Each structure stands twice: as C-alpha cells, then as structure tokens.
Amino acid sequence: MASQMGFLAGEPCNPHRLIIVEGIIGSGKSTTMRFIAKRLQDAGRAAVPIHERTDPHPVRATDELEHWFEPWRDATPQNLADRALARWSAFVDDTQTDTPIRILDGQLFHGDLTHLLLMEADRALISGYIQNLAKVIAPLNPFVLYLWQEDVEEAIRTVCAERGPEWVDYQINWKLAAPYCVRRGFVGLDGLISLYREYRRLTDDLFSELPLTKLAIENSRRDWPTYNTQILRELGLPTE
C-alpha cells in the first residue's frame, strides 16, 4: 500500500486539522493516536486526542440510537449512513472555527462503517458513504493513517490472547449476533477471524480509493520505533 505525503514544515499554509488512525481491533490505533497528539503538543501545536470510547462521541452516529451496539434493531443502513454524515458535517463546522488538531481513534472505518457492514449494507451504499464522507471532511485537510497486518488470523489471535477470554466473549457475543455474521454462520473465535478478514478486504479497498492524504503501515513486527519515525516524518514533525 502506498503512502501519500502530507503535513507541516515550518508554518504550513494548509495544515492538517484532522488526523484519523485506522485499523482492525488491536492494531495499535489508540496508542498511535495518543503518540501523535503528544508529539504535536511537544511541537507547540494544540492537539486533542479523541478515543473511540469517548461518550458522547462527536461523530459516532449510533450514540443517538436506543441500541447503539446493535443498530440493526433501530435503523436501516441508509438511515445510519445519513445520520453519520450529518454528525461529521456538524463536527467539521465546529472544528473549522476552533484551533486544536483533532486526532481520532478510528471512526472513518472503525465505528459506523463497521456497523454498516454488520447490518449487511450493500457495497454501493458503503462505498458511496465513504466517498461522501471524504468530501465532508476535505475542508479539514485530513490525514489518514492505516495500520494493517498481512496475516489477519494471526493478528486477531494475538490480540485475543493479550486481552483475555472476557474481552473475546464480548466481541463474539456482540458482533457475531449481527445479521451479516448470522447469515454467514460465523461462530466463535473462528467466526470473528472470518469477519475481520472480510472487513479488512473491504477497508483495504476503501482506503486505496480515498482521495485524501494517507499513509499505510504494515505493523505485524510491532517495530514501533520504526513506525513512529515514519509517521512523524510524514507529518513533518521532529523525529527526536
């Protein structure tokens, strides 16, 4: 996956006002989000990290639903996509008049798009949603960092081993109860792995089509010093 250059050098005329860190569960999104925010702050730039668990969340459309973790009970895929775009539009309006750079843990893919997949939204709807979302956030000159792993099964088994059986059961009981997984007969840990293989294929394609400044890093080796240096260079930030 190719990278595309973006960010600061001295006083940029069009700096990134939004940075989004994407990847499957356990790929390092939250840690990387906090790292970027800290290095921006160290460089004298106001930056606000926004974790996926922030409640209420500024862009997550399912917050408005009664069954936020099972949106298929309250909304159609089109309805959820429309809600999400409206939330993002309001977020952009607010951010354009404020100073800090927002660094998001997911929410371009990981978040409402995940729910659209679980709700069995068709590919045309999902693709159209992401293209429309890219247009909505374009005024913020966003930078998208995509953390990916060549072997999805190994990545999922690793994070499950690290986070323990209670977390694994939570993921399985929630996500595999969704229409997409039920129709395909996904069960247990193997079912969760199958879901994320399909999710990764989808997000790989969506990422490749994004008309935004972006960088993809295959991080299976967990060589974070190397990855962090690459990220800082892409953002024009000091590497020391």
Image (cartoon, grey):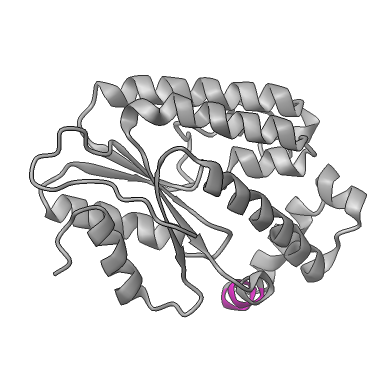
| Residue nearest the observer in this picture, 66 or 105 | 105
Q: Is residue 230 left or right of residue 42?
A: right
Q: Residue at image x 91%, y 57%? A: 185
| Residue nearest the observer in this picture, 142 or 65 | 142
Residue 63: x %, y % from top left: 58, 32
Residue 151 location, quadrant:
bottom right
Q: Residue at image x 36%, y 74%? A: 224
| Residue nearest the observer in this picture, 1 or 163 | 1
Residue 202: x %, y % from top left: 67, 50
Q: Is residue 120 at least partly visible in the picture?
A: yes
68 is higher (above) or lower (below) than 194: above
Magenta: predominant secondary structure element? Answer: helix
Q: Is residue 214 left or right of residue 151?
A: left
18 is higher (above) or lower (below) than 26: above
Residue 77: x %, y % from top left: 73, 29
The magenta segment is: 157-162
Q: Is residue 8 left or right of residue 187?
A: left
